[in-house]
Amino acid sequence: MGLFSDVMTWMQRSRLRQRLLRMDERRLEDIGYSRALLEDGVRAWPWRLPVDSIAQLGRFELGPFRGPDYAKATAELAALADTLARGKTRRHRDKVTAEIEGICHDTWVKRVITWELTGATPAEHRLAFALDTRARTTLEKEVFGKRILITDHDDWPIADIVTGYRSQSEVEFGFRQLKDPHVVSFSPMRHWTDHNIRVHVFTCVLALQIAHLMRRHAHEHGVALSVRALLERLAGIGETVLIYPSTGGRPKARRMLTEQDPDQRQLTQIFELDRWAPRS
């Protein structure tokens, strides 16, 4: 398992290196990495700057937490206000009020959007609403601040901690993929001995890693597909044999790839499948 562990470590560092190279120079300096060492490759790990050249190491930010999207609520309120302004609705006040409260049911939206329903009869109902900028500012200061990451990996660089946090969804997706009964499936196992179970688990995890590396490689070349969709596209690339009759002697056979859609043609170029294609 030592070789497998070394390969996994190399792939993790390579992935981290690619993410760091996409950062600008200032951010790299802020988190203590050297672009020159990063450009030297994985062998230059850990790519750290000298201690005296690291500027404000703790300034690496995750960015502000995204609060609720008020656009949807305001759009729905505007549509309702237009309907009421035409004066042809027959809904009573309690039903209109219930609809408005349903649109503003979100706790944060309720605190920021103010509304007023006027009119005594259904034809006279009019809706006015507005965004309370002061309430929104207060809410952002109170709730939507910065994310605080708590970790026991004291020896990890800040970029590694942030990368690990942002990779949680990838890990969860990997577990879901292992439960897929058709692609990179963990079950059915059909093994009972400890040795065979360990081999089965190792094979499944290795297949999952390879599948995700293929998906990542395709994504870097502009083809955004899930693991299942990617493998289905690749499985659709087949080889066919055309037999031509001959007037004398053995019939002539020609091998060629099946017709491909644009995604399959692009995948053929990305994974260099032409090397294995039959020569016509």
Image (tube, rainbow, N blue to C red):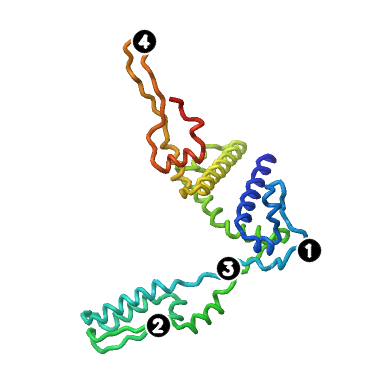
Residue type at mark 2 is Ala
- Residue 165, percent from left and from top: 60, 60
Q: Nearer the viewer, mark 1 or mark 2?
A: 1
* Residue at left offset 69%, top offset 62%: 29
Q: Are marks 1 and 3 in contact (CB under 8 Å)?
A: no
Residue at mark 4: 249
Q: Earlier in the sequence, mark 1 or mark 3?
A: 1
Q: Earlier in the sequence, mark 3 or mark 2?
A: 3
- Label for residue 130? 2
Helix, strand or loop status at disc 3: loop
Q: Nearer the viewer, mark 1 or mark 3?
A: 1
Residue type at mark 3 is Gly
Residue at mark 3: 63
- Residue 160, percent from left and from top: 66, 57
- Closer to the camera in the image, 183 or 275: 275
Residue type at mark 1 is Asp
- Label for residue 52? 1
